[in-house]
Amino acid sequence: MFKKINYLLISFLAPLIGLISCAPKNEPVLKVAVATNFLTTADTLAEVFERSTGIEVLLISGSSGQLATQVINGAPYDIFLSADHVNPFKLSSLGFADAQTQLTYALGQLVLFGAGDVEQNLKSGNFLKLALANPKVAPYGLAADHVINDLNIRSNVEGKIVFGQNVGQAYGFVKTGNADLAFVALSQVQGTKKSYWRIPQSFYTPIMQDAILLRPGLTNKVAHDFLSFLSSDEARKIIIKSGYEVPQND
Amino acid sequence: MIEFGPLILTLKLSLVVTVLLLFIGTPLAWWLSCTRSKLKPFIEALTALPLVLPPTVLGFYLLILFNPTSPIGSFWINFTGESLSFSFFGIVLASVIYSLPFMVQPLQSAFENVGFEIREAAASLRASPLDVFIKIVAPLSKRGFLTASILTFAHTLGEFGIILMVGGNIPGRTKVMSIAIYEHVETLDYTQAHILSGILLVFSFCVLFLIYTFNRRHPLNVG
């Protein structure tokens, strides 16, 4: 009986020990914390960077607020690609990042997403629920809030707004049919079958997505390289193709 | 300084869910404690599912079930004129599913503890099954009812993931304490996060402390 149990135990444990010992041996050289809305684009960028430099890039995704909290609590990231410009600023003012290195790598483009003539539906109040990312935590949500003010449709949307934690969740609310309209990022709706209205830039303050070098990255030459790669023509092309604008080169 | 909105909403949600689950969980637990049906393990497994499934799985399915074009969602919108997702009733329904095992399991074991012999004896004296339950089993299971209710209440108090997914963070309707805390942490507003978290921590401890104190004073003495 005991023997049987022993064999059973071993047959369970052996593969487990194997799994643990097979954990990756090479620590990635560069750890980049990236806001979830930029993750797929960052993936492409990291691939190109890896191909040309041979340096492995590890992407850690989360909301800008979450990532900033992780950094404050000691997460060992080299670079932070935020979805806004406030969080990088907060980090540098707290001494966790180098203010000199903050740069805008992309300008987020806001769209209204849904079925039919979304612009008309929004303006005439012809919808049940309008989803936005929470303006308190998500820059796209804040921009959407400004658009609602500028279009003077606050009374149309009163009681119909629902909040996602980020544009991804707002998008999902429409995708699953729980909301009719959602303010999301252009990068999310490319290639979608549903219609969308690209909000004119004059209706909202530009959504500056900023990158900054974090304290562990200061002494890492590769981190500096990755930052300058972000403003290279090659990287800018990829960023524009993914549905963002880039700031004019000065 | 303290935001009372999320606090009151959370207490309201927990209370409504506990009362609803008392009505749903009691007959279910009673049936489970008596039945010899082959369905029993199936139902038991189904009841225990919310214990092991991540809230994301439940949240994802509920999001799909609640949408106004689905059968349940469209029935609800025709019935009340309001969509089920992003409504208070929506998160009540989600919490009822999520907290179901916390009501059913303690009740079931309490009912089973009463003992088969007592029930048989009562039945042989021509007590109807309902009589057996109301006059004998329920009074002897007082502790089970209390434990189940408090656990359900406390568990709903701490619910987060599902509500985050189907609630839509609407103040006064779906923005419960855990969501408000999450938002404060996200915006690095640690003062408010500390206040709300502190309240939740102290309150939850007190609730559990009360259960254990009560359990010590009223040990199980049936059988």
Image (tube, helix red, strand yellow):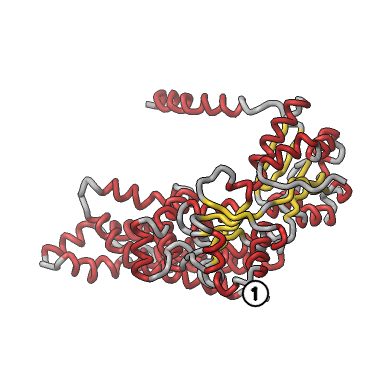
Q: Residue at x 46, y 51 (%)?
A: B60
Q: Is residue B129 above or below residue A56?
A: below
Q: Is residue A22 left or right of residue A80?
A: left
- Does any portion of residue B205 appear in the rendered image? no
The residue drawn where x is 82% and y is 41% is A216
The percent position of residue B148, horizontal first and vertical second, equals 39, 63
Q: Which residue is mark 1?
A: B2
Residue B207, percent from left and from top: 51, 67
The chain letter for the residue carrying disc 1 is B
Q: Quadrant of the N terminus of chain B?
A: bottom right
> Can you tell which quarter of the image residue A149 is in?
bottom right
Question: Could one spot residue A49 in this view of the protein?
Answer: yes
> In front: B41, or A90?
A90
In this image, A56 relative to B77: left or right? right
Image quarter in which the C terminus of chain B is found? bottom left
Quarter-of-image position of residue A145:
bottom right
Q: Nearer the viewer, residue A143 or B24?
A: A143
What crowding class fits label 1: few (fewer than 14 Cα within 10 Å), some (14-19), or many (20 or more)? Answer: few
Q: Secondary structure at mark 1?
A: loop
User: Does B82 appear above or below A35?
Assistant: below
The one nearer the camera, B24 or A169, is A169
Q: Is B27 in front, or is A118? A: A118
Hey, what amino acid is under mark 1?
Ile
Q: How many marks?
A: 1
Find residue A105 and report its horizontal and vertical position in percent: 77, 45
| Residue A76 coordinates in the image, percent (x, y) | 76, 42
- Please report the residue visible at 49 percent of the width from the left and 68 percent of the height from the top: B210
